[in-house]
Amino acid sequence: MLFVFRRLMLKFFRLFRLFSLTSAQMFAKMSEIGDDDMKKSKRVAAIVAVVICTAAAVSAVLLYSYIKTNNSYKNAPLALPDTFTVTGHTGCMGEKDNSIEAMETAVKAGAQIVEFDLNFDENKNPVLSHDAPKGNEVTLEQAFEFLQSNPSVLANVDAKSTENLKEVNALAEKYMVKKQIFFTGIEEEDVEAVKVGCPGVPYYLNVDVNKRKASDTAYLEEIALKIIACGAVGINMHKRAVTKELCDFFHAKGILVSVYTVDGYNEIYRVLAAAPDNITSRNPDRVLSIIAEKSK
């Protein structure tokens, strides 16, 4: 791989050197300048070429490092928790967001968990919607009917609003799916509403983990104490900051780690190497395929 990059850099240098000299000659001809100015133009063009080549070389080194790192993740042994799950993100595999079809597709792909967004219409009825409802959404009752007919499937209810959780609780009890649901999208200020509105339903605390501090144990300890104090079962976090060290730290505290939204091949390999408890993906089939491949 390194040999290939060296050859590419040599070609880059030759190309830019030719470009710089040709540009200088053309500039001299067009401007009808003298030999001294021609030499100055060549020097300027040569400097520009060196700068460009240096930038290209640095980019190549970074690219090589990136590929090497990704290969290390790809070749890393699979050491996932026994209870590891894959969640089909709402709208997964090309389906419409917050649709029954998306849930069906996720389950057919092998995902143990489906995800949908919880919101409330103008009458405070629970519906599936990321943004303010417009009146044509799938209702939460329809989603719970789906869960009732698929008792082995869990649902990640991503709460975009906690306005009327008592109605959510009533529907969950009506369709006997309360043990199949849990909340994400929960901030510290939402915790009390969840405890009062849906007692007994587990929830993950959403935390925007600072990637630069993800290896700082004092920082992670602060997050862990917050999660425990809120009564959450785990942390729901973005993929950018997850590491094996972070997952190990939280697992030692009895805190589950759920990571979103992990779609591309390289990021799937990287997050799997970190060994979280759950990966949420728009491509659950891809995640499961990679797991099967690495399990051989």
Image: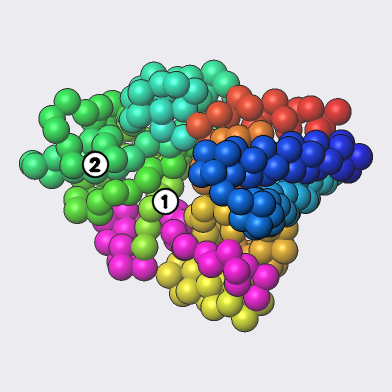
> Dot 2: few (<14), some (14–19), or many (≥20) neighbours within 10 Å?
few
208 drawn magenta = yes
Question: How far from the left and from the top, in percent, is residue 283?
Answer: 55, 29
Q: Position of residue 42 (x, y in %)?
A: 68, 51
Q: Relative to 142, does residue 200 appear above or below in the rendering? A: below
Task: Identify the residue under disc 1.
Answer: 184
Label 2 vs 1, first from the N-terminus: 2
Report which quarter residue 29 is drawn in. top right
Residues shaded magenta: 188-216
In the rendered image, the quadrant that contains the N terminus is top right
Q: Position of residue 234 (x, y in %)?
A: 53, 59
> What residue is at 48 percent from the left and 74 percent from the top?
226
Seen from the viewer's position, the closer of residues 161 and 245 is 245
Q: In 3D space, how far apart are the residues under numbered discs 2 and 1 (Cα atoms)?
A: 16 Å
The front one of 282 and 155 is: 282
Residue 191 lies in magenta, yes or no? yes
Relative to 19, 117 lies left or right:
left
Amino acid tagged 2:
Asp
- What sort of colour scheme is used for the picture? rainbow
Q: Is residue 85 above or below residue 147?
A: below
Q: Nearer the viewer, mark 2 or mark 1?
A: 2
The image shows residue 75, relative to residue 48, as above or below, that is above
Q: Nearer the viewer, residue 21 or 106?
A: 21
Secondary structure type for disc 2: loop
- On screen, residue 59 versus residue 134, left or right, reads right
Of the 4 image quadrants, the one containing the C terminus is top right
Front-most of 248 and 140? Answer: 248
Tell me what residue is drawn at x 86 percent, y 37 percent. 7
Q: Secondary structure at mark 1?
A: strand
Q: Which residue is mark 2?
A: 131
User: What label sits on residue 159 in the rendered view?
Assistant: none
